[in-house]
């Protein structure tokens, strides 16, 4: 898909974007692909309106046929009966479920929701990169109207391969003890992970050499798995701390030795549960599910004023059932089952 196809599909998508819970469109036909914003002719356009601008592209080094196309959405909204401009920012004078009087913050919320980070749009992965500050667009009868620019990037392919949807960039949220897979509140939230997780499948094998062949391998056997998931938690809260220091926490306090004795079985139900990693784009990217995991802190912890403190945690995977996915599952969340 080339840039032209992306922009045309994007325009069609935005023209059809409706206010959440209604059939009323945010922009209607007032979405345009332009080389620059026609500031001198804004009075000709209905409000709110949106302009799509090409911001150039870069080729992706790891996949020569993959292109990162940048574009900007510049959104304008007129002021309605507010000499100070607060209404056009915060929707103070909005007619319910319509765009008349809607604030620019509410309009862009619908845009971002519609193009939510890493959402597929005709084989393009779209990510919000930057929001400019809200600026005054024009003055009409001393009532300031406003605009804001949102910068996005989209991975597209100039050839049939690679497919952008098959390239895994999987930021997401880590959940402890999930009880359902049907709603965004899967369980106890441990935190958002922009760098994803490090999964060590632990696929173990044994290679044997035939006596008559010397060192030449002749057979290979599967010995099972010893999987691990490594994550860097940035959240300092009771749920995260309890996973890092099982048996040694009280709320957000870590205390040694507490009542936790050497030799305590960390595979008991007190210290184990399911672990679920859910990507932002659940339609195209896989989740990772451990049916039974035992966590603990790994590596050192740096407490610093200048940098975010990272807590490296390892989750060891154990067999919970004898089902085919009784230890772990990697795939779309629609195909996952909690054991």
Image: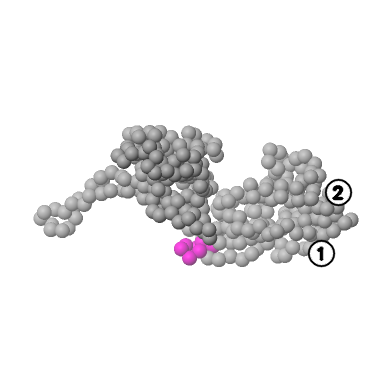
Query: What residue is pinned by disc 2?
Result: 81
Residue plotted at (44% across, 41% down): 249
Label 2 residue SS: loop
Q: Earlier in the sequence, mark 1 or mark 2?
A: 1
Q: Position of residue 68 (x, y in %)?
A: 56, 61
| Viewer-side residue, 139 vs 29 | 139
Location of the C terminus by quadrant is top left
Label 1 neighbour load within 10 Å: few <14, some 14-19, many 20+? few
Q: Residue 14 vs residue 196: left or right?
A: right
Residue plotted at (54% across, 62% down): 67
Query: Which contiguous range is marked in magenta?
Result: 60-67
Location of the N terminus by quadrant is bottom right
Q: Tell me the tag on residue 250.
A: none
Residue plotted at (32% across, 48% down): 202
Q: Tell me the tag on residue 40.
A: 1
Label 1 residue SS: helix
Residue 325 in view here:
no
| Viewer-side residue, 94 vs 176 | 176
Label 2 neighbour load within 10 Å: few <14, some 14-19, many 20+? some
């Amino acid at each position: 898909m080339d840039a032209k196809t992306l922009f045309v599909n994007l325009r069609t998508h935005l023209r059809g974007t409706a206010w959440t819970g209604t059939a009323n469109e945010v922009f209607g036909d007032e979405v345009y692909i332009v080389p620059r914003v026609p500031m001198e002719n804004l009075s000709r356009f209905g409000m709110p309106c949106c302009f799509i601008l090409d911001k150039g592209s870069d080729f992706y080094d790891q996949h020569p046929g993959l292109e990162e196309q940048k574009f900007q959405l510049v959104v304008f909204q007129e002021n309605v009966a507010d000499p100070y401009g607060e209404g056009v920012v915060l929707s103070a004078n909005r007619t319910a479920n319509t765009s008349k009087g809607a604030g620019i913050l509410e309009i862009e919320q619908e845009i971002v929701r519609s193009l939510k980070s890493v959402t597929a749009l005709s084989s393009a992965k779209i990510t919000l990169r930057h929001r400019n500050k809200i600026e005054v667009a024009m003055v009409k009868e001393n009532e300031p109207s406003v605009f804001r620019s949102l910068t996005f990037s989209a991975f597209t392919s100039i050839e049939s391969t690679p497919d952008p949807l098959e390239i895994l960039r999987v930021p997401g949220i880590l959940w402890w003890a999930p009880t359902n897979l049907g709603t965004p509140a899967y369980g106890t939230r441990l935190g958002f992970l922009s760098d994803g997780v490090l999964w060590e499948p632990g696929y173990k094998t044994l290679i044997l050499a035939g006596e008559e062949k010397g060192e030449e391998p002749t057979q290979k056997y599967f010995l099972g798995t010893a999987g691990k998931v490594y994550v860097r938690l940035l959240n300092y809260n009771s749920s995260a701390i309890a996973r890092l220091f099982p048996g040694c926490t009280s709320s957000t306090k870590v205390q040694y030795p507490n009542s936790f004795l050497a030799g305590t079985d960390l595979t008991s139900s007190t210290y184990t549960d399911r672990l679920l990693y859910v990507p932002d784009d659940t339609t195209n990217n896989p989740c990772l599910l451990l049916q039974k995991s035992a966590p603990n802190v790994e590596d050192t912890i740096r407490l610093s004023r200048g940098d975010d403190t990272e807590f490296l945690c390892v989750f060891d995977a154990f067999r919970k059932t004898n089902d085919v996915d009784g230890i772990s599952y990697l795939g779309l969340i629609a195909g996952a089952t909690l054991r």
